[in-house]
Amino acid sequence: MNLAGLIQISIGAVLINNFVLARMLGLCPFLGVSKKLSSALGMGIAVTFVMAMASLCTWCADAFVLAPYGLEYLQTVVFILIIASLVQLVEMTVQKFSPLLYESLGIYLPLITTNCAVLGVALINTGTNPYSGRAFTFVEAFVNGTMSGVGFTVALVLMAGIREKLDLAPIAKPLEGLPIAFLTAGLIALAFLGFVGLGFSSFAAGG
Amino acid sequence: MMSEELHRGIFKENPIFGLALGLCPALAISTSVFNALGMGCAVLFVLIGSNLIISLVRKWVPDRVRIPCYITIIATFVTIVDLCIKAYIPVLDRQLGIFVQLIVVNCVILGRAESYASQNTVRKSIVDGVAIGLGFTLSLVAIAAVRELLGSDRFLGYTVIPGFHPILFFAGAPGGFITIGALLAFFNYRRLKKEKSVH
């Protein structure tokens, strides 16, 4: 097990190639659920969980079913169906075993199916790992999925914190609502650009 | 009827500036007008196709499983587009990357399937697909035009103002956010001004 490689993937997924702020994936929930800090955290945790599970399932489906039979052209259809059923399964499991968690996450779970971050990480995992130059292994795909989810959560929570403060600020009428949210996101993204300095050599911005 | 629908799709219910749907591709691939046109045409095709099929089968699809059915139909069209782009326009494929496959989860398409095609006739649904698809394409091109012009001093690959030093900021991710925010604010300003003059 190459620990250094996994750490590289983690730092890359959370800070350098942040799913929302650098790759621009998962923007709909990023803008839709970032009005309150508590719901932002709930959504982030739910997405992280689904992304980790989806990475495992889609990697297995790709490596053991699609690739051996030359069916890679079915990737999109198979992946989205896996993700949709996975979200349903997670929803039912959480509802059965932890009603308390379900109550706080419940409304976000169905939304995750159409979150492009989940399908995005599944597709990125089928490509090559920019740090090793080879295809993602099972563990690497899992770490990439989990850490991309953590990166999504970080961005969402940062944004929610700022938007809670923005509610109290006097804002020009045309900028109210989405425009100011976009400008804020732009400034956060600008700050995250600084993390590119952490980048490791031969790093390629996929996506 | 057609022009009315087009007006609705492009202005009143513009997917990006009016309803704030489908934002991921709007930001990620709007670095050049060429990419925006390619993405817009891909979405237009998928939208027309999925609207057509969904309005055809709308009476046989049970209510409880309609979303998975819609997603499968959409995914099929996305696969068609993806393979065509890979085969015929490899340049565009390299530029758009995974965003072609991510059209599946573009909320504009599922939104139209759920709110329009599943309740309307085939003909109306196709017109709706054309109108919304054109609205999406035009907004993408608008964002891309600003970003390409300021970020690399080009329009469709041709240099516009010789000697103008491009502002790289607009080609990157933060520039995308700022551009779309500014454009949204501009359209809001226009709308507010119009409303004021009416009263």
Image: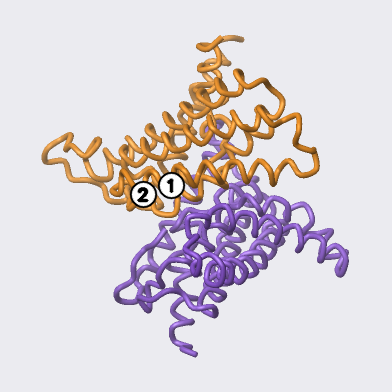
| Residue B82 badge | 1
Q: Which residue, as the protein is rendered here, is positioned at the far front?
A: A69
In the displayed structure, A56 sits above or below B92; it is below
Q: Position of residue A12 (x, y in %)?
A: 44, 72
Specify few, some or many for label 1: CA neighbours under 10 Å numbering under 14, 14-19, or 20 or more: many
Q: Position of residue B164 (x, y in %)?
A: 16, 41
Query: Mark 2–mark 1 contact, CB under 8 Å?
Result: yes
Residue highlighted by disc 2: B86
Chain for numbered disc 2: B
Chain for numbered disc 1: B
In the displayed structure, B93 sits above or below A127; it is above
* Camera-side residue of A190 and A147: A147
* Camera-side residue of A30 and B169: A30
SS category of the residue bearing label 2:
helix
Q: Residue type at mark 1?
A: Asp
- The quarter of the displayed image where residue B8 is located: top right
Chain identifier, colour purple? A
| Residue B4 badge | none
Q: Position of residue A95 (x, y in %)?
A: 85, 62
Quarter of the figure that contains the C terminus of chain B: top right
- The quarter of the displayed image where residue A41 is located: bottom right
Chain identifier, colour orange? B
